[in-house]
Image (cartoon, rainbow, N blue to C red):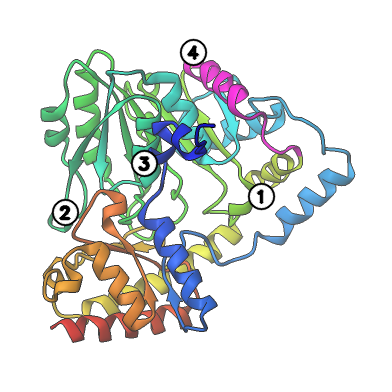
């Protein structure tokens, strides 16, 4: 009888979909804590606030009213209307409810868009540093990622000229994330307009604009790419409720797009999952229609934490920093410390060493397309932030 090994049956895409460094560092942190080690983790991109109570109450009321059944694949009409109103009032985007597709989280919204557009041979422009899921999703769809990079000297913002020089007839999608995870960078209106000028010259280039962190901005303003002249028909706008409303576990995101693409995204979602949770959608209406008092309160807390992190990192000789005008991430350049010991030759090895010897977890920048930096999340208590910074200082001092 032949030997049977199910591992040999796995499709190549199964290994290609691994989120790599983020998963690895999270698991190492759990393993060390299980051994009784004291570890401060600054990895998780998740608000440490509970979902505002009025949103919880809206979900409970919806369940009691019977909203516990399947929902339409593209979302309930009332929520799609509320999202369309929000986009027009706050972002200057004129979408009809029929152009809105609710999804089981922003990851699914992005996957719906990529799978609706990208085929084998299509090129997708990624602006590094970028959120890890972009590259994975493009590869799963059969597309070819074209990565353009900008370091700390450019405030981590790829220039429109770099984009123009990289475009080919095969280019079909550019993924833009402003405010940005992992860097906190925010593109100005002038920078976005220069990018729009480049996009408008290409015969078939679409832009996926991920605006997930629009409410967590400290300086400047969040500009919707689709609101720029001539860009609405070129843009798929994605957003959600996880970060701004502290609703990570509720798994609700959305995309707004030209109608043919919106219809295709709904078909893609129907193939892979179904409509988003019914009572969560009712709660999302309450979130959108309420004043932004809770959003502002959380943002001001992040601002205080940002200031603590910026001051702390500025005190470490050798660390290079760009401004952090938004989000709850810092992305310091630590390339000066790489190779100072044999065991810290790469940024991945440096993060392993910081965790194992100094009890602080960071995510290596390689997960985001940058081998010189580490990502630190300040969606954590001020106590943990201060303790984590102290441990980072001790670690880097030991390498000096």
Q: Which mark is residue 151?
A: 2
**Separation of disc 2 and disc 4 at Cα?**
37 Å
Residue 100, relative to residue 300: is it above or below? above
Q: Which mark is residue 290?
A: 1
The reply to whether discs 2 and 4 touch (Cβ–Cβ < 8 Å) is no
Looking at this view, is 349 or 105 the one in front? 349
Can you tell which of label 3 and label 2 is closer to the viewer? 2
Look at the image and give the residue range highlighted in magenta. 259-278
**Separation of disc 4 and disc 3 at Cα?**
24 Å
Q: Which residue is mark 3?
A: 223
**Residue 163 in the figure: left or right of residue 43:** left
Mark 3 neighbour class, 10 Å CA radius: few under 14, some 14 to 19, many 20 or more: many
- The answer to if 389 sits in the magenta stretch is no
Task: Point out residue 50 in the picture as x, y percentages from the top left corner.
Answer: 64, 64
Can you tell which of label 1 and label 2 is closer to the viewer? 2
Task: Point out residue 224 in the picture as x, y percentages from the top left corner.
Answer: 39, 37
Mark 4 neighbour class, 10 Å CA radius: few under 14, some 14 to 19, many 20 or more: few
**Residue 96 in the figure: left or right of residue 285:** left
Looking at this view, is 320 or 299 the one in front? 320
Q: Which circle's residue, 1 or 2, is located before the other in the chain?
A: 2
Task: Point out residue 252 in the picture as x, y percentages from the top left corner.
Answer: 61, 42
Element under disc 2: loop
Quadrant location, the C terminus: bottom left
Looking at this view, is 358 or 150 the one in front? 358
**Separation of disc 1 and disc 3 at Cα?**
22 Å
Quadrant location, the N terminus: top right
Task: Point out residue 230 in the picture as x, y percentages from the top left corner.
Answer: 32, 21
The reply to whether discs 1 and 3 touch (Cβ–Cβ < 8 Å) is no
Is most of the magenta stretch helix, strand or loop? helix
- Residue in the picture at 40% in, 19% down: 117
């Amino acid at each position: 009888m032949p030997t049977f090994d199910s591992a040999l049956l796995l499709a190549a895409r199964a290994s290609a979909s691994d989120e790599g460094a983020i998963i690895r560092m999270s698991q190492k942190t759990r393993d060390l804590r299980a051994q009784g080690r004291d570890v401060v983790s600054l990895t998780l991109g998740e608000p440490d606030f509970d979902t505002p109570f009025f949103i919880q109450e809206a979900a409970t009321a919806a369940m009691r009213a019977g909203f516990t059944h399947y929902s339409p694949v593209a979302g309930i009409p009332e929520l799609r209307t509320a999202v369309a109103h929000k986009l027009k009032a706050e972002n200057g985007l004129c979408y009809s409810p029929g152009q809105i597709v609710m999804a089981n989280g922003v990851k699914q919204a992005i996957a719906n868009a990529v799978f609706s557009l990208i085929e084998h041979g299509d090129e997708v422009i990624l602006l590094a540093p970028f959120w890890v899921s972009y590259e994975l999703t493009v590869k799963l769809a059969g597309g070819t990622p074209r990565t353009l990079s900008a370091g700390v000297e450019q405030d981590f913002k790829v220039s429109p000229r770099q984009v123009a020089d990289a475009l080919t007839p095969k280019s079909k999608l550019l993924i833009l994330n402003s405010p940005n995870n992992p860097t906190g960078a925010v593109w100005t209106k002038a920078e976005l307009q220069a990018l729009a000028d480049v996009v408008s010259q290409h015969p078939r280039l679409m832009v996926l604009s991920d605006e997930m962190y629009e409410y967590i901005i400290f300086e400047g303003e969040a500009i919707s790419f689709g609101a720029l002249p001539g860009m609405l028909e070129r843009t798929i706008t994605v957003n959600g409720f996880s970060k701004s409303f502290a609703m990570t576990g509720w798994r609700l995101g959305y995309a707004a797009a030209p109608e043919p693409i919106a219809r295709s995204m709904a078909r893609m979602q129907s193939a892979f999952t179904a409509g988003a949770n019914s009572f969560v959608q009712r709660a999302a209406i309450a979130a959108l229609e309420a004043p932004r008092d809770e959003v502002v309160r959380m943002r001001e807390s992040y601002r205080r934490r940002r200031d603590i992190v910026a001051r702390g990192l500025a005190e470490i000789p050798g660390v290079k920093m760009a401004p952090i005008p938004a989000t709850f991430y810092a992305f310091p350049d630590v390339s000066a410390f790489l190779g100072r010991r044999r065991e810290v030759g790469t940024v991945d090895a440096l993060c392993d060493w910081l965790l194992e010897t100094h009890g602080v977890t960071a995510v290596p920048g390689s997960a985001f397309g940058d081998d010189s930096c580490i990502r630190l999340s300040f969606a954590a208590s001020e106590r943990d932030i201060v303790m984590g910074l102290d441990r980072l200082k001790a670690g880097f001092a030991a390498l000096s």
